[in-house]
Amino acid sequence: MPSGRTPKPMIVTLRQIMRQVSAATTLDDAAAILVRQASQAVPIDGCAIFLKNAAQDAYPLVAAQGLS
């Protein structure tokens, strides 16, 4: 981070992420935004979202970033 700049409080970052997710027009777009922004907001190598499919008793991957 450049000198003299303070990091944004996490609540501000989370609010911005949720605004972007809320503006998405599809579930796939919302999930992609969420994993991308979460990966940038916190020091993690990867992020993934799985949604439960009760009919098939499975958890398919909906979106991922930074995973091999």
Image (tube, rainbow, N blue to C red):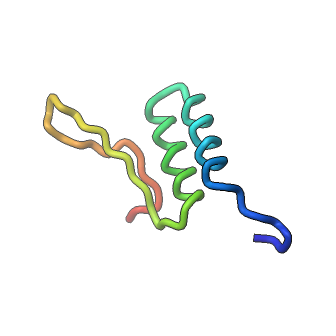
38 and 62: which one is in front? 38
x then y, percent, for residue 56:
14, 33
x then y, percent, for residue 24:
56, 30
Q: Residue at x 46, y 40 (%)?
A: 31
- Quadrant placement of the N terminus: bottom right
60 and 21: which one is in front? 21
Q: Residue at x 18, y 31 (%)?
A: 54
Vertical arrangement, residue 7 with respect to residue 18, above or below: below
Q: Decide if residue 57 is on the left or right side of residue 9.
A: left
Q: Residue at x 59, y 57 (%)?
A: 41
Q: Decide if residue 7 is on the left or right side of residue 49.
A: right
* Res 51 quadrant in image: top left
- Quadrant placement of the C terminus: bottom left
x then y, percent, for residue 49:
37, 47
Count of numbered marks:
0
Vertical arrangement, residue 45 with respect to residue 56, above or below: below
58 and 3: which one is in front? 3
Outermost residue toward the right in this view: 4
Outermost residue toward the bottom in this view: 3
x then y, percent, for residue 11:
61, 48
